[in-house]
Amino acid sequence: MLSRTGPTRHAVVAGFRPRAEYAGSIHDDSAARDYGYRGALVPGIILYGYMTDVVARSWGLDWVARGTMRSHSRRPVYEGERLTIHAAPAREDADGLSVEAEIRNAEGAVVATGAATLPRAAPPAPDPADYPPRPIAEPLPVVGPGGFHPGDLFGCLPKRMDRDDVEEAVTMFGQSWPAYLDDGIVPPAYLPMFASRNALASYALPTPSIYVSAHTRHLGIARVGAELTTAGSVLAAYERKGHHYIDQRHMVFADGVPVALVDRTSIYAARKAH
C-alpha cells in the first residue's frame, strides 16, 4: 500500500512465463546473447506491471478507470532476479494524487523508474474517430533500420478476453488487488502489452524489439467478455548510438469503447554486440 508519510517497499522475484511468441526475441536466451545480454530479458512491461500492483492496491477502481501510469527501463533484468519496488510517499495537490516509484535489483541499482497519478476528475477523452482500427496487412511490410516514419500505421488482431486471460495477466504482472479476479477486470498493465503485441505483429522488423518506456492514460475499464482492439501510429523515428527507435501512440478499445491511450517508445532495430 502507498503511504503519505514514508516510502513503501515491496519485494518481487522477476520472472515471466515462456511463450512461443518470445522465440527469436530478446526474451529468448539465444537471441538475447546476440545483442550482448547474458540471457533472456524479463520484458520491460512486466516491470511496469509490478509497479501498477502497488498503485492499484492503494487507489483501487478509481485509478483503474481514470488514472495514469508510466515506466522507463534503465537496466536489463533477468529471470529469477530479486527486485525491490520503492514507492515514494504519495502526494496530493489540486490536481489529485501522484506517486513516483523505482525498481532496484539486489545490488541496489535502479533497473526501472515509474510514476502514477489519480486525477480528481477524468480529463476529456480523445475522439475515437481519430483512431480507426485496421487489420494487419498481408504480406507484412518489411522495415529496415531507419525505415519507420511519422504517420506509419499499426494493424490489429482483435482479442476476446476470457477469465483465463485475466488469470494469466494477474500472474504475469504479479497482481494482488483482488478485484481483478473477483470482478473480472482486465489488469491495466495488459492494455499497453496488447497494444505492443499488435504493433509488433504489424511489421517484419530487422531485429527483436526492445521496450524502453510506456505511458498509459486509463479511459475506462475492460472486463471479461470484452473484445479488445487497438489503433495506433508512429509519432517519431530516430537513431541513437546505433539503435533505431520509434515513439508510438495507441488507442485501446473494449467493445469499441476507449479504455486506454498508450504512448510507447521502443527500439525496433537494435545494434548487435561485437
Image (tube, rainbow, N blue to C red):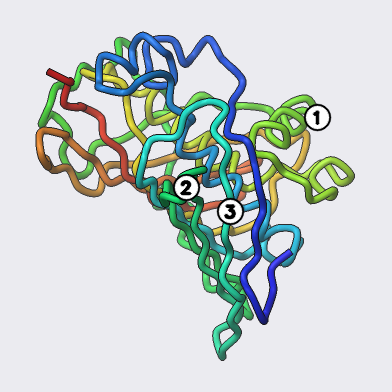
Give the spatial CA distance, label 2 vs label 3.
28 Å
Q: Which residue is mark 2?
A: 251
Q: Position of residue 219 (x, y in %)?
A: 59, 59
Tag 3 residue: 85
Vertical placement of residue 88 versus 219, above or below: below
| Left or right, 226 with reference to 156 | right
SS at badge 2: strand
Q: Is residue 37 above or below residue 258?
A: above
* Label placed on residue 163: 1
Query: Which structural element holds mark 3?
Result: strand
Q: Nearer the viewer, mark 1 or mark 3?
A: 3
Q: Secondary structure at mark 1?
A: helix
Instruction: Give, as a three-letter code, the residue at label 2.
Output: Met
Disc 1/disc 3 C-alpha distance (Å):
28 Å
Tell me the kind of residue under disc 1: Arg
**Which quadrant is home to the N terminus?**
bottom right
Q: Are marks 2 and 1 in contact (CB under 8 Å)?
A: no
Q: Residue at x 61, y 76 (%)?
A: 90
The residue drawn where x is 89% and y is 44% is: 182
- Within 10 Å of disc 1 (Cα), the crowding (few <14, some 14-19, many 20+) is some
